[in-house]
Image (tube, rainbow, N blue to C red):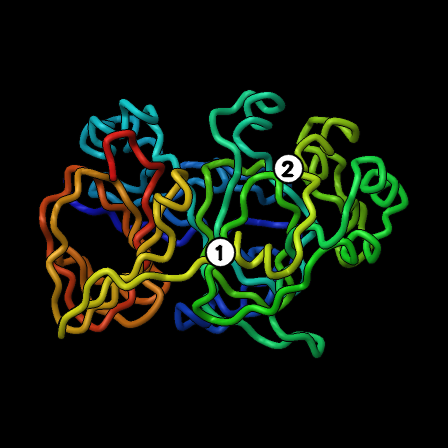
Amino acid sequence: MKPLKMLPNRVWRIYLGGLLLDELRGESGTDGYFPEDWLASVVEANNPPREDTPAREGLSRVQTEDGIAYLKDLIEADPQSCLGEKHIRAHGVHFGVLTKFLDSAERLPIQVHPDKDAARTLFHSDYGKTEAWYILGGREIGGEQPHILLGFREDVTKAQLRELFDRQDIAGMAALMHKIPVQAGDVFLIEGGTPHAIGPGCFLLEIQEPTDYTISLEKCNTLGEKLPDYLCHMGLGFDKMFDCFHYVRHTEPELLAKFKLIPTKEEADDTHEITTLISYARTPMFSLRRIDVHGAYTREPTGMPSAFVVTAGEGSAAQIPVRKGECLFIPASAEAFEIEGDLTILECLPPQSETEE
C-alpha cells in the first residue's frame, strides 16, 4: 500500500489563532477560530454544534481515484495493510495517535487532560491524553514573548482549585503555575493529569493520545462570552472533573527536568539527518522523529504506520509532491521509498507495541 496525502483539515476551537499556520503554507490569512489543523486524524472533535459544523469534524480526508474518503474509513476497510498485524494485536484497529498544527494568538484556557487511569474510570476510554509539543516558532503578542503555563509551582489541594474555579479567578489559577518561555526546537512532554496552558504566540506541532478530552478551568472565552458547561467538564460534571488533576508541586528545575526533553541525533551523512525528539523510552504513548533531507534519502520499511508532517522545504516522498505544511499517512505495508528535495519532516509514530524496542 502506498502513502496517502492528507487534505487540509482545519478544526474549530474556542481560541483565536492560525495566522502562522496560513503563512507556513504560503497563504495570506488572519487569526480566527480555526487555529489548528489535525494531521492524519482518526479522531472526531468534541465541539458544540454550530451552523457550519462539517460532518465528522476533525477526521482527516484523502483524495482518492474514487473521490474524497476519510482516512479512518480507509484504515477500517484494510486494517492489515494500513496498521500491520503487530499494531492491531497491541492496539486494535486504531491508528492510536493524533497530531496537530497549533498556532495560538491568545492564551488557551487553563486545562488538564486525563491520564490513562482517569480516562478508563471517568470516560471509559482506552486512551487518555498525554501529549507533547514541538515548538516550531512563535511571535510576540501584546508585548509578551511565546510561553507556556505548566505544572503547579506550589502545594494545591482539590478544594483550593475548586474554590478558585467557582469564583472564576483566572489570575489566581494562573499564579499557581510555572510560566516557561519557549523557542523553536523546544520539546515538552505533558503527561495526563498535568495542568497546563499554551500561551499567546506559540506555533507548534502537538502529538498526543487520540482523544479530545479537555477539562477546562475557564467558563468563558477571552471575549467574556459564556461557553457551554460541557466544554469545561466533558460530561463529567463540575465535581468529578477535578479528579483528572495530579496535585503535585514541582520546582522549576524539577519541572524542566521532568517535562522538557533533549533531542538526540541518531544518524547523519551528507544527504540526511535523523533526530529523535521523543523516544519510546520516555513514553510508550507515541514517538516523534525529525528527518532532515538534503538531496535524497531512502526510507526503509518499518512495518509500522506513521504520519509524515513537512515543516520546511519542498520535494517528494514516494514520488508524491510535498511541501511545508502538508502531511502523508505512511501505511505499515509501505515498501521502501525515496524522499527527495530539501525537506524537514516530522515522523509521528503511534503507541509502542510490546515487541518494539
Q: Which residue is mark 2?
A: 49
Q: CA distance from mark 2 to mark 1?
A: 28 Å
Does 175 sit above or below residue 237? below
Q: Position of residue 60 (x, y in %)?
A: 39, 43
Residue depicted at x 66% and y 33%: 244
Direction from residue 234 to residue 347 in the image, left or right: left
Q: Which residue is mark 1?
A: 133
Residues packed near mark 1 inside 10 Å, few (<14), some (14 to 19) or many (20 plus): many
- What secondary structure is found at the residue carrying circle 1? strand
- Answer whether residue 216 is visible to the viewer in this image: yes
156 or 125: nearer the viewer: 156
Q: Position of residue 218 (x, y in %)?
A: 77, 47
Residue depicted at x 66% and y 52%: 250
Residue depicted at x 31% and y 57%: 276
Circles 2 and 1, Cβ within 8 Å, touching? The answer is: no
Direction from residue 150 to residue 55 in the image, left or right: left
164 or 20: nearer the viewer: 164
Residue depicted at x 27% and y 41%: 67
Q: Position of residue 327 (x, y in %)?
A: 32, 54
How many numbered marks, from 0 up? 2
